[in-house]
Image (cartoon, rainbow, N blue to C red):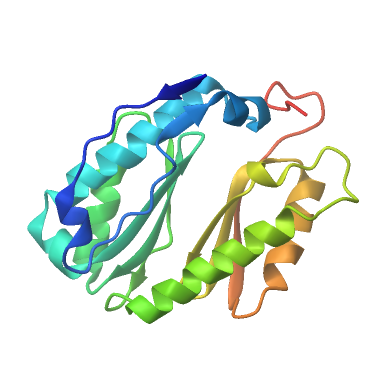
Amino acid sequence: MKTLIPILLIPILTTGCTTLATGSAEVTGLSLLHDRRTSEALLNDERIEINAGIELNANDAIRDRCHFNVTAYNGKVLLTGEAPTVELRDNIVAIVRVIPGVKMVHNEMAIAEPTTLASRSNDTLITAKTKSSLSEVRNLPGFDATRVKVVTENGVVFLMGLLHPNEGNVATEIARRQNGVKQVVKVFEYIESGSKANAD
């Protein structure tokens, strides 16, 4: 049985230099079974990403001149992409920070012109290869690759998730070994054995 989240279609997402990476916008029974986030946290993360798309694309300068990705995980938001000026980058951060449900913003946006389509295609390939390699982990009891969120921007891989420290270390090493990866940035929320968030 699937629980679908209402989605607002935003045509302007496909125009100009702006792109917005969001989650699947769908919470299934399978994802709830594997995810360490609560169902409320999952829904909140989806709402944050959708609302961020609406708010950021309502700003003409941000929409036309910047490339941004908004990824929410357990209320914490990772901002990646490029803004040509500090002012535009700070405006993006300020807008996202006050969206309901946001606990913290990790600002990883670069002050630069938006990346090319070729660069973004390469980032998509790196993300796919990293996820595939994570799914092949067999020597770490309880490890579930679906609990690791992978975001790649201009060759830099960002890793999110509710993980035990040893799981985070394994995921980081796997990401580092992928071709084309310049750097790996850990944005994990670490949990300890016996934590309520642990749903092995």
Q: Residue at x 82, y 30 (%)?
A: 193
Quadrant location of residue 31? top right
Where residue 9 appears, as percent x and y from the top left, is 21, 41
Q: Residue at x 64, y 57 (%)?
A: 131
Nearest the viewer among 196 and 125 is: 125
Specify whether residue 116 is in view. Answer: yes
Specify whether residue 102 is in view. Answer: no
Where residue 51 appears, as percent x and y from the top left, is 26, 37
Residue 41, relative to residue 76: is it above or below?
above
Quadrant location of residue 83? bottom left
Where residue 63 appears, as percent x and y from the top left, is 16, 60
Q: Residue at x 57, y 23 (%)?
A: 29
Q: Is residue 176 left or right of residue 71?
A: right
Nearest the viewer among 156 and 84 is: 156
Q: Residue furthest front?
A: 1
Q: Is residue 138 left or right of residue 17?
A: right
Where residue 67 appears, as percent x and y from the top left, is 28, 66
Looking at the rendered image, the quarter that the C terminus falls into is: top right
Residue 85, relative to residue 193: is it above or below?
below
Q: Residue at x 91, y 51 (%)?
A: 139
Residue 179, relative to residue 196: is it above or below?
below
